[in-house]
Image (cartoon, helix red, strand yellow):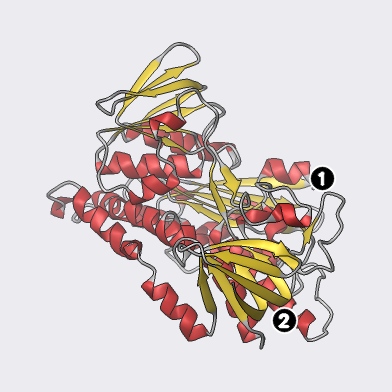
Amino acid sequence: MQNATYDVVVIGAGPVGENVADRVVQGGLTAAIVERELVGGECSYWACMPTKALLRSQTALRAARQLPGAREAVTGELDAAAVLRRRDAFASHWKDDGQVSWLNSAGIALYRGQGRIGADRIVEVTGADSATTSLTARHAVVIATGSGALVPDIAGLREAAPWTSREAAAASAVPGRLAIIGGGVVATEMATAYAGLGSAVTVLVRDGVLTLAEPFVGERVTQSLREAGVSVRLGAEVTSVKRDGDGTVHLTLADGAQVEADEILVAIGRTPNTHDVGLDRIGLKPGAWLTVDDTLRVVDGAGALVGDGWLYAAGDVNRRVLLTHQGKYQARAVGDVIAARARGEAADDRPWGRHVATADERAVPQIVFTDPEIASVGLTAAAAEAAGLRIRVVDYDLAAVAGAALHADGYQGQARMVVDEDRRVIVGLTLVGPDVAELIHAATIAIVGEVPLERLWHAVPAYPTVSEVWLRLLEAYGR
């Protein structure tokens, strides 16, 4: 067995693990990172980048078709093969040479294999050749192994070899018929993507579409999917699945209805990748989500730190927010606090302090790349009320903004602002409409900065842009 010692050992070389290691090194410490698959993780190869590449071409085509003059220049349909080739390029053809080169340039040591905690501050790495390397961390071990798709216990489902988000993102061909179980972000984005690429898509939704968003979000996305030819079946519960010898998938619903497809995508949630990282050796449950304190140190079921606080968890595994950008945000806090503690400095763990991830609770931005796009940050009206806030909700027709009318003929959209009436600050904003993704950061800044509404009056939006919705929302609030 080989042995090596570093200040910090990170298990998981996705964007979260990479950012932890980078901040640690920038803080003057040494770092090693362990990865059993591709350096760059889920987002680079099976999620954020390839899925958005699948969606972008049809978004551009839709935009052109909504503009007289440009519409007449569109003479054909979407070239699915070209879209898949572009997707392949954004997934780096599932090779991680570029990411490994970056690790080397950043001074981060890479160990390939399965990393498992062997004891306090010890990570054992088992390589493809079964050889084991023992890594000792002087200061901290960070688990950043992310999450995987949850496959429910439906009779015959696993035997039918369903797609998860990975297979949907990396498919080499477009199925003629695609059935999707689920109504969340992955389900709706992939329904949008594959319908645009030519699949006959059926979405089977038990509890509703995008139920964590404002109610009008799910309504508009459902309407848009149906207008695109997608069959959206609300209240549908799959009870059994069978794949025939010819590849046809048969789904039976609770009401006895049958659905046939060439592929089936399961998109009902995520599960933590913690089943094989050695949690049992330190008194934690393998396969469980990890609970963390304010500075993202792992705690046990009683709320006590693991050991003297040497173990951290960042990204999906701590279940705070399952989004890449929030995981990277956590990673920056983790890397910085580990470096600070190594220097004997106190952690800045005040709300909005350098070493905490306060935004996870108050200002999480998210984009759903359906058609229309959904952009949101902060709390929905329901979540704000559940938090005990005295709120006022302001709605505005996004299509009534001059910039929206210029952006596309027949533009349809909606904006909702949620205001904390006691502090007179915005605590949530949701936008629905074509190309609203780039508008959300202004709202994120307003929420994080707790900018009073009276001051926001002086943030003048340029005319004629869709951003003028800010002025219209403030005017509607003042009435």
Asked whether residue 136 is in view, the answer is yes
Residue named by callout 2: 339
Q: Position of residue 359 (x, y in %)?
A: 69, 62
> Left or right: 178 with respect to 21?
left
Q: Which residue is painted at 70% across and 75% down in the image?
A: 137
Q: Position of residue 212 (x, y in %)?
A: 61, 41
For the residue pair 301 and 474, the one nearer the viewer reads as 301
Tell me the mark number nearer the camera, choosing from 1 and 2. Answer: 2
Q: Which residue is painted at 50% across and 64% down in the image?
A: 127
Identified by mark 2, the residue type is: Ala
Q: Place residue 161 in its image quadrant.
A: top left
Q: Secondary structure at mark 2?
A: helix
Q: Which residue is painted at 29% across and 43% down in the image?
A: 196
Q: Position of residue 171 (x, y in %)?
A: 31, 47
Judge whether 9 appears above or below 252 on screen.
below
Residue named by callout 1: 388
Q: Which residue is painted at 62% across and 66% down in the image?
A: 124
Please tell me how many numbered marks the rendered image carries: 2
> Left or right: 61 with respect to 264?
left
Crowding at mark 1 (Cα within 10 Å: few <14, some 14-19, many 20+): few
Q: Place residue 19 in its image quadrant.
A: bottom right
> Left or right: 168 with respect to 458?
left
The extreme front residue here reads 1
* Mark 1 → mark 2, Cα distance in angstroms: 37 Å
Judge whether 237 appears above or below 221 on screen.
above
